Amino acid sequence: MSGLILISIMSGIALNLFPRHDGVVVELIGQQRLDPIIHASGNTLQMCFNAPVEWIEGTPLPIWINRVAADSSSVTVEFDQLIVSADWALSGDSMAMIIFARAENEILLPPVAWQSPPVPPDTSLWSDSLVYAALERGEGSPWLVDFDCIVIDPGHGGRDPGAVGGSGSQEKDRTLEISLMVRDLLRIRLPELRIVLTRSVDEYVSLGERTRMANRNRADLFVSIHCNAAVNRSAHGFETYFLSRARTDDARAVQMLENNVLELDEVSTVSDDPLSFLLADMAQSIFQNQSSHLAGSIQNSFTSTFPVRRDRGVKRAGFYVLRGAFMPAVLVEVGFISNPEEEQALMSLDFRFRAAQAIVESIVEYAGREN
């Protein structure tokens, strides 16, 4: 068994188990930041803490686990021999850790009790285990073999207006208008592709649901469209992001601005499906090169379309809306709605159409490269 974990943590931890048809997920939620140390010992996982462990003795165990023993400062989990490997990921705020202990083969039992694995996912979709196995090998998601679907994500919407310009123009309206044009132009340029919008009207869609929609549709590309904003009203230009740790103050500021909508979701940044942020953690590195290439292509296309406007370049940031995508993904900031001149441009049909064309040209170029 590879990659099991010995964890030393500075505060109390809640330990949860999530049985699956292909293994078991161990979720650790701390009161403070976690500080993991990797260790393996056969099929046994020992977790040592400096605070009491929240685990109830006698809780029924899934078939993948033989034993869980806990005292005031440690927990030992003994996996069944059916478990052959384990991997882990730390949440962005380091407050939670996920360990996915995976079996070599799926075991499909009826859901007669909590002890048996849950019903397997819809076989018409790619299961998490297939995605996990591909990412573990350093490959892309299984459906990326055929380039046949693109998801366009109009930023914000509904009760989330996004940034608001000095004249009252709302980001959610401009992003939807541009995204609808991108969809229609793509249907003309690439009629063989399926184009999906995360929203086509003024409605609220959570950040997590946007990428879940892309994964459900087995998208080959995820493009999120936004308008920028800054305290400095003279800030101007266009920029494109791909998922990575922010490296500049400007990138961190934009990341904070776009991630603020999480407050409207009224949910933790830790995923409801513990395996999903493990997959997202792996996907982040797998798709970086492709996402970076598309971001560069979009910047070049905008520069050709708007030669007098500032090219702010390709940047990296930890946008939550990109984190759950199991495919190449970018976020485009088409202009600063906080800048009076660019706000007026964004309210212009001609500008929005040309911005949509610039994005479409880049996607067409990317599609040709992938096919």
Image: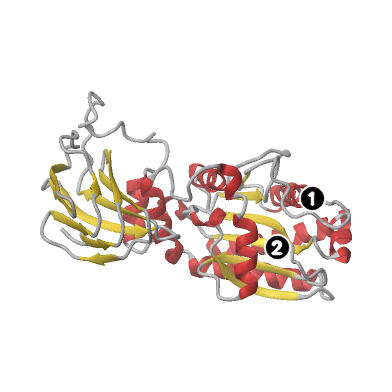
**Residue 146 place in picture, x, y as percent:** 49, 52
Disc 1 secondary structure class: loop
Identify the residue at horizontal 44%, vertical 50% (top origin): 270
In the image, is 259 to the left or to the right of 118? right
In the image, is 171 to the left or to the right of 244? right
Identify the residue at horizontal 30%, vertical 62% (top origin): 10
Q: Earlier in the sequence, mark 2 or mark 1?
A: 1
**Mark 2 Cα shell of 10 Å, populated few (<14), some (14-19), many (≥20):** many
Residue type for callout 2: Glu
Q: What residue sits right under mark 1 in the picture?
A: 170
The residue lying toward the viewer, choosing from 94 and 127, is: 94
Identify the residue at horizontal 48%, vertical 47% (top origin): 268
Disc 2 secondary structure class: strand
**Residue 279 place in picture, x, y as percent:** 39, 54
How many marks on residues?
A: 2
Residue 296 visible: no
Q: What residue sits right under mark 2 in the picture?
A: 333
Which quadrant is home to the C terminus? bottom right
In the image, is 343 to the left or to the right of 155? right
State which quadrant residue 248 falls in: bottom right
Q: CA distance from mark 2 to mark 1?
A: 14 Å
